[in-house]
Amino acid sequence: MTRRDLRPLFDPRSVAIIGASEDPAKWGNRLSLGALRGAHRRAVYLVNRNGGEILGERAYQSLAELPEAPELVAVTVPAAGFEDAVDAALEAGARAIVGISAGFGELGAEGRAREQTVAERVRTAGAVLLGPNCLGVFDAAAELDLGWSEFPAGEIGLISQSGNLALELALLAADYGLGFSRFASLGNQADVDVAELVGWFAGHEGTKVIALYCEDFRDGRAFATAAQAAVEAGKPVLLLAVGASEVSVRAARSHTGALVSDLAAVDAACRAAGIQRIATPRELVDLAQACLARNLPRGRRVAVVGDGGGHGVIAADVVVSLGLEVPPLSPELASRVASELPPTASTRNPIDFAGGGEEGFWTFERVTGIVLASGEFDAMLLTGYFGGYSDFSDEFRELERAVADGMARAASDSGRPLVVQSMYPASPSVVALREGGVPAYREIEAAARAIAWLLARHEQRPSGIPALPAPAPDRITESGYLEARDLIARAGVPFTASQRVETLEEARAAAAEIGYPVVLKALGLLHKSDAGGVALGIEDAAALDSSFSELATRLSPEAYSVERMAALDGGAELIVGCRRDARFGPVTLVGVGGIYAEILRDLAVALAPIDDATAEALLRSLRGAPLLLGARGREPLDIGAAARVAATLSQLAAAHPEIAEIEINPLLVTPEGALALDARLVLDEKGEDGAR
Amino acid sequence: MTRRDLRPLFDPRSVAIIGASEDPAKWGNRLSLGALRGAHRRAVYLVNRNGGEILGERAYQSLAELPEAPELVAVTVPAAGFEDAVDAALEAGARAIVGISAGFGELGAEGRAREQTVAERVRTAGAVLLGPNCLGVFDAAAELDLGWSEFPAGEIGLISQSGNLALELALLAADYGLGFSRFASLGNQADVDVAELVGWFAGHEGTKVIALYCEDFRDGRAFATAAQAAVEAGKPVLLLAVGASEVSVRAARSHTGALVSDLAAVDAACRAAGIQRIATPRELVDLAQACLARNLPRGRRVAVVGDGGGHGVIAADVVVSLGLEVPPLSPELASRVASELPPTASTRNPIDFAGGGEEGFWTFERVTGIVLASGEFDAMLLTGYFGGYSDFSDEFRELERAVADGMARAASDSGRPLVVQSMYPASPSVVALREGGVPAYREIEAAARAIAWLLARHEQRPSGIPALPAPAPDRITESGYLEARDLIARAGVPFTASQRVETLEEARAAAAEIGYPVVLKALGLLHKSDAGGVALGIEDAAALDSSFSELATRLSPEAYSVERMAALDGGAELIVGCRRDARFGPVTLVGVGGIYAEILRDLAVALAPIDDATAEALLRSLRGAPLLLGARGREPLDIGAAARVAATLSQLAAAHPEIAEIEINPLLVTPEGALALDARLVLDEKGEDGAR
């Protein structure tokens, strides 16, 4: 889709409200009140078929009566009148329509079809439609306020699928003096979708951070592409996404299917685009504040500074629990810092002023400058009472504010971030810190997390959104075990030797040819292991006979696979797979396999297809990576071979949209290579999973 | 120590302030102002050697001038005058002394000796001393306020080693309308220590929760014993402890020594006493609020309820991330709930009112009652807008408050907890919820964590503080590898066969007798493996010759141990050990060993000695427990044998105070038993580690 002009949605030259109302219980009242607040800079027309006066203004009976074409039309009539209202708006020359009216796609397929028809008419007319079932828009600079009077102005661009959440974010942001440059309520995304809005916000000068609450990503790859462009343009994208508790809902037919939840697919997109995903409104606002910082840490070394008491040690513990480091100062730096402090002060790390700040406020500025300029630390965290002196007297307030300005300058000059936790987060000096680019929080965990997030921003290398190849012409139609093996083997993945057999005689001959020990697998079962359809470690012909007859009696399989039993010693088992997500397309998974899969719950995901290098980076990102890399005297395993298998599988899934799930579990990695010991393939059967 | 009467410290009949001052910059001014606030119920005497008037009151030049014996004397003179002031107080008949004066134990050994002498004199006189170097006391019911005017009254008893932290806790608690029944600033604990204060607070009617910030636990077992008694008396003990970032500071000589940090020892005490340990002031206050709940959840099933928007799904994700469950409602319950809600509402879980609460406030009460009384859930979490309706009108405020009362009643009647997250946490209806025993938070993560904490309280079974046996008469003096093996083997722990040898000929003979494969270990090195002093998997005499000569050339050890090489297949490696902590005495550690130790960082600790059952419970609490219990078709290992080894080692360490560190690493656990493959012993050498 070529980029459309959304300016009329956020900064229209004129606005009309269809469904304007005098009744405070109606959204049309709120919209009208909001719109009228911008009447000093644009024409505002209230429309109600009853005419008369609303809020002291003339109410037009229809758009046809307006003296000019309204550039933006907000529609808040009942669903039955929605299409007519939109048609009237387009006829009147509207360039943008905000569909407040509900009762469409959110109710099911019929409503979805209705809103699609409307959206098509809007697009044909060259206009844009936000919603329906949305809660309006807000633009601080344009003074456009359709229903959101409680929004403080600021630099966060907000796109949300929930009005209440937008309100909660506004309330939380206000604590920090943060606010919103823009807000768009997503609604049903019949026309303008989250990807298009992200793209538009990325180009908005007044927006420094893009915050999102989204349940439905529509074209997930278009969204990720737009987000990556925003991130690369220097506008962090913060995503509040849900679905962690939804895993159990979907019936998955492979381990990969179960492990790659909808949220895991979102995570793959975040990894590709450099989006920071968070789980709660509080985290979103805390992270938005972190974006105030003018510099990013370039390493994990944090200097923790407190003015007495337990704050420093508590903060140091929290910092370390987030994977950051609190290393001691060099003797030289310690002695320079000590020269600014009373003799009882500590200049290890945490640095404890021991009341030295209370004795002379400028100590805060001087120590900030010395510590951050030293190059021994990547960030400084100040914790405790600073901010509280302002309460004592006007003189103290002036002084503390000046010191705060000095600290912010010292941080800025050093090229390294200062982050503050203050018991008095709303004090004038703490406000001054924020104005100077110093994130300042009330809670120590928030301040420490801010540093961790800023470091994550420094370290993140968006891997980019991979292009999907054209579908391969040879559509896959068979998903049995042997067909899956063949498909994957043909793509270049090594398997253990195997032969399909139907009778005991054939099994004996196959085992003799392959060589003992062997494995005997019953065919025709999706979950062979769970059904007890796999006999491992068959050492000789007698054992083969007994395993064969046991499987035959219990499961009556149509056939069997006799396979060479691989020696697991010194190797590691991985799970490697792909699932096609309805929104984000094929997603690759790598994880530690075997019994450790349950204990470690250790997996990494990426949008497919991936190349060998990306696959290896994924493997190295696992907590269990030491298993592969040869820690504690173990021989390093062939991580390159494992990466090649993951990449191959991802390319296969990307080229075959009919693959719903595909996996190798386990993939045995040894010092000499990687060997697939099992395979599973699930094809997309229409009707069972219509979304794909 | 028999229990002493601390009443004079918190509710004295009269108070004298030595070092009273007119100067607002001095603590003596703050103390005097505070003490005078209680002048309507007790005599308050200000003492300053200059006499005259202070704060409009007569200033006595010495205690000798007072018309009566002052029951409590606060001393805030410079350190040089401290002993004289205490002596004067005792002579005047004081029963309790609050030592504000600083400059003693916090500066080092000399100050420690000084304050010990003072404390001894106080004890001899039958009085008690808080401090020195403390910041006073506060008791809401007794209206005793020595310096803490900013403390709101409430039900939290606070004991803190940091004044600033106490202030921060007060500021955070005020958000929730929570306050303090009592506060004692610990100071240097020269006489009254944390254990004694916990014991005294446990008996205080006005104190419902005991909150602690403590850096120095003194007699750790006495503290744990006092805390356990408080917990068993129904007063939760919340401990803000530090030290997580201190691990690297202490030089440890075994893996156990490194893994059992000071904080891990605290954790062992918490496990024994049923203390809940938290990491930040915010967590402490959030948890203190959770203690408002009148009932504990008895399982993990949480009903999540929101009135529209994304709140419910976000909350469900957070709840699940804490290890709780959000199962669906039964069809019967779903239909009962649905009958209270609009047709667009969701009655899965989360339950989404879809605006049904806005349409009729009583819906909140009815659904709370139906859901909690159903027995299908162990707790309910309400999230979102509730509380916000109060802003609309007086009528709405009245109504919402009445509904809040009804919800609290419904929760109380059901015997199950309701926990609330509200965008308007200070609204009158949310205050009413708290008054009715419903914890109500601003942040969803805090509300969800409260449920997890309440469940932990239900599930916690304090294992109790084990008694330490009398020191064994046969003091251990040798800590070499073979001596450690012998010591542990004599206690009943099975080891692999081994022989000490000095020459290659002896090694050959030993190996022939023991049987190949063997292990050859160089003796006389503390970290044999790290130094490359262990040759594994020697299959025959030729391999033995070459390993022997390699070790001899590189390390020139005095001797060697030839040992039977155990087969690791099908087994699991554990680490089992004990470290003697300076405050808490011997602490037992169990953990997953081998390479997984690094990946899982999976260990559990307990105060030693432990019995077999406690040891097995520790092993089962490991994340890696499935390795032992036989998950995914593996044969279960002999967890009982492993538990016996851990218990034995703990009893050995408890009986031998000269053992600083002792460990078996690895302990091989197989289906048939447990076998020690290595041993390490570190004795307490005075001078190197004087605290022990």
Image (cartoon, coloured by chain):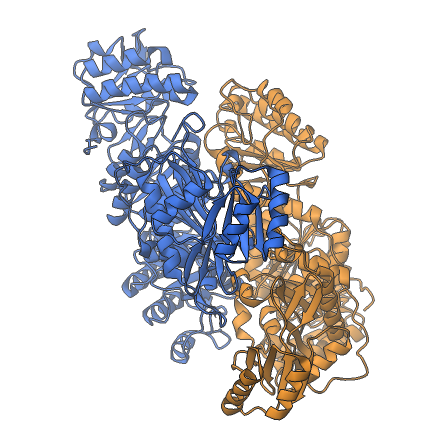
Chain colours: A blue, B orange
* Residue B476 as seen in the image, left or right of residue A134: right
Figure disc tally = 0
Q: In which quarter of the image is the N terminus of chain B?
A: bottom right
* Residue A298 as seen in the image, left or right of residue B202: left
Work out whether residue A260 or residue B220 is closer to the camera in this orientation and state it: A260
Toward the left, the furthest residue is A68
* Residue A631 as seen in the image, left or right of residue B654: left
Work out whether residue B539 or residue A184 is closer to the camera in this orientation and state it: B539
Q: Where does the image place residue A238, in percent across and percent down from the top left?
A: 36, 44
* Residue B228 as seen in the image, left or right of residue B315: right
Work out whether residue A159 or residue B560 is closer to the camera in this orientation and state it: B560
Q: Quadrant of residue A263?
A: top left
Q: In this view, does A191 lie above or below A544?
A: above
Q: Where does the image place residue B286, in percent across and percent down from the top left?
A: 58, 47
Q: Is residue B373 above or below residue B24?
A: above
Res. B484 visible in picture: yes
Q: In which quarter of the image is the C terminus of chain B?
A: bottom right
Q: Where does the image place residue A428, in percent across and percent down from the top left?
A: 39, 51
Q: Where does the image place residue B672, in percent across and percent down from the top left?
A: 71, 63
Work out whether residue A692 or residue B332 is closer to the camera in this orientation and state it: A692
Res. B21 visible in picture: no
